[in-house]
Amino acid sequence: MVEQIKIVHSSTVQQVADGLTAMILSGGLKPGERLRESLLAENLGLSRNTVREAVRIVQAGGLIRHRANQGAIVWDPTDAEIMDVYNARYHLETTAARSISETTSMDEVHTAMEEFRSVLKSGDPFKIVEKDLAVHSAIVGLLGSQKLRIFYQQLVTELRYFMFVLSIENHEYEDPDSLEAEHQSIVDALDSRDPALAEKVISDTIIQYRESIRQVVAQRHSAN
């Protein structure tokens, strides 16, 4: 299980945290799975304190939760938690859409879209998800508020998790043309400088993804 965690240049604690994050996002560690720190430490040849600090870093990002009598487990989101994250995303991005005007600079959004387009055919879901979220971060950036941008970044880890869940279940990133068209429609709506149109396109997209995630997670829970 631990072969994905490579000890290289940055601090050992951060490397273990990055490795655990990658394992969770890729499905190597399943939702609800318990993390046995002593076993991880033994397999990696590290102290238990080092592994414990790494787990705390991942927990701070929301991908690991602490449950009484079980310790650290991989986040297995409830429907209410999914709704909470996506409602926050909905309000930020639709507010940004309503804020556009003839003088709004779209440079950051266009740059993010080009970078997203450049990685779509790579087949690497990690790169694709990162650039996908960068497009949406740029949309929130249209509000011109650093505090709101920082708040959105706090959602990114959880959104990344949901996007990986969807990509694994639905093989979403095996259809780059569809993903490109979907995101281009958002950019085109923003470029139209029509706030109502931009809000509708973004709203429809977010709701579609939210409902897909809710369905995938509900099916998994019912199967268990």
Image (tube, rainbow, N blue to C red):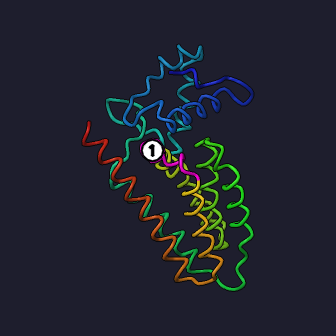
Residue 170 colored in magenta in the image: yes
Q: Which residue is nearer to you in this view: 201 or 181? A: 181
Secondary structure mainly formed by the magenta segment: helix
Q: Which residue is nearer to you in this view: 92 or 108? A: 108
Left or right position of 61 against 215: right
- The answer to which image quadrant residue 57 occupies is top right
User: In the picture shown, does residue 20 fall above or below 132?
Assistant: above
Position in image of residue 85 (x %, y %) = 44, 58
Left or right position of 146 against 36: right
Position in image of residue 132 (x %, y %) = 60, 55
Magenta segment boundaries in residue numbering: 166-176
User: In the picture shown, does residue 46 fall above or below 21?
Assistant: above
Position in image of residue 178 (x %, y %) = 54, 57
Task: Write down the residue under mark 1.
Answer: 165
In the picture, the quarter occupied by the C terminus is top left
Q: Residue at x 62, y 65 (%)?
A: 147
Q: Which residue is nearer to you in this view: 180 or 217? A: 180
Tally the marks. 1
Residue 207 colored in magenta in the image: no
User: In the picture shown, does residue 196 fall above or below 55?
Assistant: below
Q: Amino acid at mark 1?
A: Val
Left or right position of 187 against 48: right
- The answer to which image quadrant residue 223 occupies is top left
